[in-house]
Image: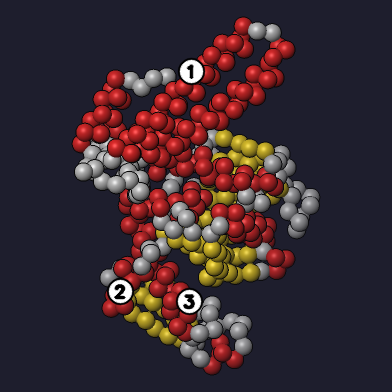
Amino acid sequence: MSPSYTQTWRLNDARNSADGASASYWQNLLTLSKEFFVRQDELAQLNAFMSENDTELETMAQNERLLLESELNNLARNIVDAVMPRTELDVLSKCQLEVTAGVGGMEAMLFTSELVEMYRNFAAFKGWTWNVMEQDNVQLGGVRSALIAVSGDEAYGRLRFEAGVHRVQRMPVTDKTRMHTSTASVSVLPEPEKVDSYVPSNSVKIETMRASGPGGQNVNKRSTAVRVTHKSSGISVHCMDERFQHLNIQIAFRRLAAILMQEKTDRIYEKSAAARKLQVGSKARAEKVRTYNFKDDRITDHRLKKSWSRVADVMRGGHELDAIISELSDHYKRGRLEEIIESNSFKPALSCSSAPAT
């Protein structure tokens, strides 16, 4: 389908008004667009050929059609990426992932442990760093809650689509007589590159205290636990997991900075219909986003209204999970692009390597 006159006019208008748009940028966009329309014509011709011929060539033609459809999807994704203005949040390399057991007792904690492992594998798959800040383990290998710092290329931009309530339906190891439904909530907070830009030392009150719980003499005799309170907002963060006070202070500052940045991003997302539809950055975190049905071997993302088979493969945290997140990301980008075009505030995204026009 060729672009409409309105779409072409808006693209040309954006081209004429965009400051610093380089020739190489527009050449790249033109090349992608031409290739997209060529592949689209090839697909139309192939469909016509298949409707006019017998079934002997159907298998070969079907394979070629799948290949063309895959190429079209990749080209469409590249075009959207080239056109979309990239925000700070899209490329943010740091975030804090929090997974907390919900309803379901021990089964919910076992599911939480599996989600943590899934995301750990996913971080390794993406080449990100994974640093456990807090983790509350329980019996049978379950996890009550875990807080992990994740950093790497677009780590926040990808993981933000995992925020919300994840539901599991299966027969748990603790009760083989009936199906159980349990939940775990996932929260993904952006972490600023520079913590002190969000939490200057003079903006907080630091209190020290003795930690409680296991940890030996160091826990009982020294004031290693800390509480950091943001003076203007009243938000407090308590940290006692590390054996040394200065490490707990560092973690508390990072946690507080992420909370303050999340409040800012929630206001940004609230203005976007695309973000609200996918529940990106939702502050309430009460929305069901995905169901893992082990009995039927089906995983359903309720935002996309789409299901996949092979739950175990998705929970390994590799390519299958990445593909689901990519669909959510593509859906979000298309929604944002529609908003930008409708608001008449379109400005193209320029490659960082593009030199300014002279």
**Few, some or many residues within 10 Å of mark 2 (<14, 14–19, 20+):** few
Within the image, what quadrant is residue 323 found in? Answer: top right
Mark 1, residue position: 41
Residue type at mark 3 is Cys
Give the quadrant of residue 92. Answer: bottom left
Of mark 1 and mark 3, the one earlier in the sequence is 1
> Which residue is denoted by mark 3 in the rendering?
239
Q: Amino acid at mark 2?
A: Pro
Which dot marks residue 200? 2
Asked whether the viewer can see residue 60, the reply is yes
Q: Residue at x 32, y 52 (%)?
A: 267
| Front of the two marks 2 and 1 | 1
Foreground tag (2 vs 3): 2
Side of 313 relative to 97 (left or right)? right
Residue at the spot x=51%, y=42% of the render?
Answer: 326
| Rendering coords of residue 325 (x, y %) | 53, 45
Is residue 103 at least partly visible in the picture? no
Using the numbered discs, state the Cα–Cα distance from disc 2 to disc 3 in whole angstroms.
18 Å
Dot 3: what SS? Answer: strand
What's the residue at 36%, 61% (across, down)?
261
Q: CA distance from mark 2 to mark 1?
A: 57 Å
Q: CA distance from mark 1 to mark 3?
A: 60 Å
Please name whichever residue, 208 or 18, is drawn nearer the observer in this view of the structure: 18
Find residue 310 and report its horizontal and vertical position in percent. Answer: 69, 41
Image mark for residue 333: none
In the rendered view, would you say 27 is above or below 150?
above
Q: The disc labelled 1 sits on which kind of residue?
A: Asp
Callout 1: 10 Å neighbours few (<14), some, many (20+)? few
Query: CB under 8 Å between callouts 2 and 3?
Result: no
Is the residue 240 above or below the residue 35 in the image? below
Q: Measuring from the top left, give residue 18's x and y in whole percent.
A: 23, 39
Looking at the image, which residue is at 38% across and 59% down? 262
